[in-house]
Amino acid sequence: MTVTPLGIPRRLLEFTIDGEVARVPEGSTILDACRAAGKDVPTLCEGDTLRPKNACRVCVVEVEGARTLVPACSRKAEPGMVVRSGGERVRHSRRIVLELLASSVDLSTTPRVAGWLKEYEAKPDRFGPAAARLDEEPRVDNDLYVRDYGKCILCYKCVDACGDQWQNSFAISVAGRGFGARIAVEHDAPLTDSACVYCGNCVEVCPTGALSPKREFDMRAAGTWDESRQTETTTVCAYCGVGCTLTLHVQDNEIVGVTSPHDNPVTHGNLCIKGRFGYQHVQNRG
Amino acid sequence: MRKRQPKTYPRLTHPLVRDARDEPFRRADWPEALDRVARGLERNRDAFGMFSCARATNETNYVAQKFARVVMGTNNVDSCNRTCHAPSVAGLSAAFGSGGGTSSYEEIEHTDVIVMWGSNARFAHPIFFQHVLKGIRGGARMYAVDPRRTSTAEWAESWLGLNVGTDIPMAHAIGREIIHAGLANEAFIRRATTGFEAYRALVAPWTLSLAEKVTGVPARAIRELAHAYARAERAQLCWTLGITEHHNGTDNVRALINLSLLTGQVGRWGAGLQPLRGQNNVQGGGDMGAIPNRLPGFQDILDPDTRLKFESAWDTVIRPHYGLNLTEMFEAMEEGTLKAVYCIGENPAQSEADSEQAVRRLTALDFLVVQDIFLTRTAELADVVLPATAGWAETEGTTTNSERRVQRVRRAVTPPGEAREDIDILCALAARLGHDWKYADSEAVWNELRSVSPDHYGMTYDRLAEHQGIQWPCPSTERLEPTYLHGRLWETEPERRGTPAPFGLVRHDPPVDLTDEEYPVRLTTGRRLDSYNTGVQSGGYPSPLRRGEYIELCPEDAERYGVVVGEEVRVSSRRGAVVAPVWIDTALRPGLAFMTMHFPDEVDTNQLTIEANCPIAGTAEFKASAIRVEKLPVATIVR
């Protein structure tokens, strides 16, 4: 007889979203249920490989009986819950959150945000030009990745990925308090003087492009980065025997970036320095 | 920090040939290059060896070993698995009849005790170590057994800093303590193992206090590890090259396996043995039969039925004896009985122990063809160099990782110039040598392998994509097997339990290269996080962590020799000498030095290492050389 571990069986629970019945496995979040029902809920700080941080608040929904709006990314679905994912209260909240974020942070490289600004009729300009912006040059202190804190929405995903949730290097942390809070390495030193091991697992989870591979950063600066011309091919890393799945991003027959699928059983989206950045040798084409 | 100009390797874009070894290469077209290779191999039919590639796909390895066996009529086929984990394969197959790690990465997240023995996985296998960290975060206790207090050891409950080459005394002392504390799993031993009484007698002298004397590890630390491992509901024993790269590597592996047999920590979900492999496809290369004693699917060449199956599948006669392994092939070069080598993607001129000797032997060959993506140091010695494609980014195929998971690799970029795929080149040569093989694509090769290897039969390309890789064994296209091996050992019916696993009766044998007054320092070697093997690959990207090659010493030794960080010193062993700058690392202790082999173009560490080989697996003792460190006279500092 073959024994295959099946995991603990999970019951389905039933509740309503926008008047329709939703059935999801126990332990699912409202966000999971909304996505399963084909509803587009905007998210920024939500990470499929990380525990919910509830930092950005753009995914809020209304739960009947709850005093405040709840973040869909962390609130577990409960039997009999009545959820409204798109009422005026929700739209108003999302609009304000998007306006505050977009007025204080450069969201130009954040995927999908332009569409959400339009959808929620957000007008970030109404606070005046570049309100409360950090106005800081991108930090280019190594050849592998760049930190542009002008694009940082303080979602803490990089802190979690570098910390106890995945990499356990603890090179990245939050410095300062309140309005002065920002992401930094110890003593705000250059990366090269920090505990950073350049795995780039922070880059992988960054939702806004505040952290980006140097290659992408340079190509964007030169105006040659063009995702519409890029292909993505899944393969396996060429270094050690662990066998991490890589997604090669190729533009004009050049590998321009490497990521890993977040649902991969070996990597869970994480790589090491060699896997993420060590691809240049195949294209030293003389 | 000193200025470094690391050598970077441009891709090979067209075939290179020459008429004599002292001539420079000239560019050739493919037909000429292939004709030359065919002639060179033809005239050395009885003196041929194939170095297959632990970096290439399973499909390439399958065709390469078939080329050696069918076209050249020899079982002399091997790969760099010989320089790393051949002892793990030999030890595991001697105990269980199968050479793969017995567990899966996910299981280590749910185990109770993790032993990392001779393994700095935090640096060498970072993503595997993330699974270990999940386990530790979930409450597992990890023990690190390593001469160096590595960054892996920083996460340990306890670090057992043993003397280099005393792994067997440590393992035997743990075994003895488990028996004496009454923690041995007697039911498992009785049902699923043989040779326990002899093992008990063998380890009887290894008391904790004797082990403390020999290994340098406090008796109570050994005792703690023994009790933790034996009492754990589930325990994982992981090792890397600290165990295998010794002149008795296979014995070391057997000594560790004994501990799992003693406690029943194998063959169950979450309990097992995990050798961490060093190349992307070193597991697969062996599985595909690119080793001298096994046919594809890890089937023994000496078994007549197996041979018959392959002979009818390949329409050939397979020699009924083992071929030469990599180490023996190098020795045969010395004796003149091996005269032609076909080297695919390996760099033995820099990766073999005692590299000067390796280069001399390769140079003395009648014919050397190297198929690679770079002009490596080995390729520089060749008669013909064939430009190949990069397995992981320019070809279709599969590779097999440390947890036996076969995964698809895919073509993402077009190879440069006239570079051709390995299989394509092999088939073109086979045709010139009278064998017309037609493979439409890599999937056709894979399906041929599936038809001869029951363990791979269930893995169609479609299923591999669907499941993000499948672990062997996978005999059925309908279902998946458990993620761990050897569950049969726990069956209650004797016939379903199969062959019991024998205890390995192995004895302590200290490193061959003894330290003495002349060579007082023990040099051990290993990997750094951002670099890889001989650096041909990893030298291609600008790592902020990379600082080049250093001889790493502990602060006490640096003070004794009066040397400081960055100062160049002369490092000599009984075989050679190199000049290297000093780095000071508090993870070391007096009398222990550390170097890597990542920068052989700067400092050729393997001039120092000893070619003392494991007689079973042929792996050299990279981990233990005796060296001397000398300050350079002031006048010679100018280089």
Image: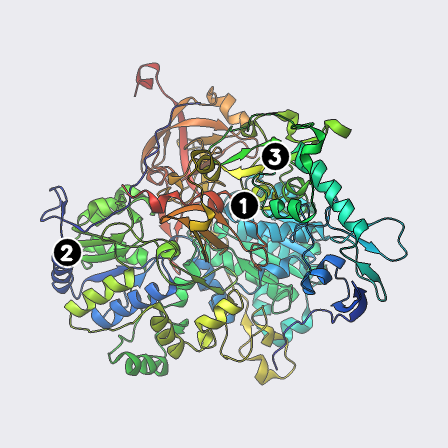
- The kind of residue on which mark 2 rests is Ala
x, y percent for residue A243: 49, 56
Which mark is drawn over residue B462? none
Which residue matches tag 3?
A: A106
Relative to A281, B135 lies left or right: right
Which residue matches tag 2?
A: B33
Query: Pointer 3: residues within 10 angstroms few (<14), some, or many (20+)?
Result: many
Instruction: Locate residue B371: give its quadrant.
Output: bottom left
Tell us which disc is closer to us: 1 or 3.
3
Q: CA distance from mark 3 to mark 2?
A: 57 Å
Which residue matches tag 1?
A: B120
Relative to A180, B469 lies left or right: left
x, y percent for residue B139: 73, 52
- Host chain of mark 3: A
- Host chain of mark 1: B
Q: Tag 2's secondary structure?
A: helix
In the displayed structure, would residue B128 be above or below residue A4? above
Residue at image point 38% right, 58% down: B411
Q: Tag 3's secondary structure?
A: loop
Mark 1 and 2 residues: CB-CB less than 8 Å, in contact? no
In the displayed structure, would residue A215 be above or below residue B313? above
- The kind of residue on which mark 1 rests is Asn
x, y percent for residue B355: 30, 43
- Residues behind callouts 3 and 2 on a single chain: no
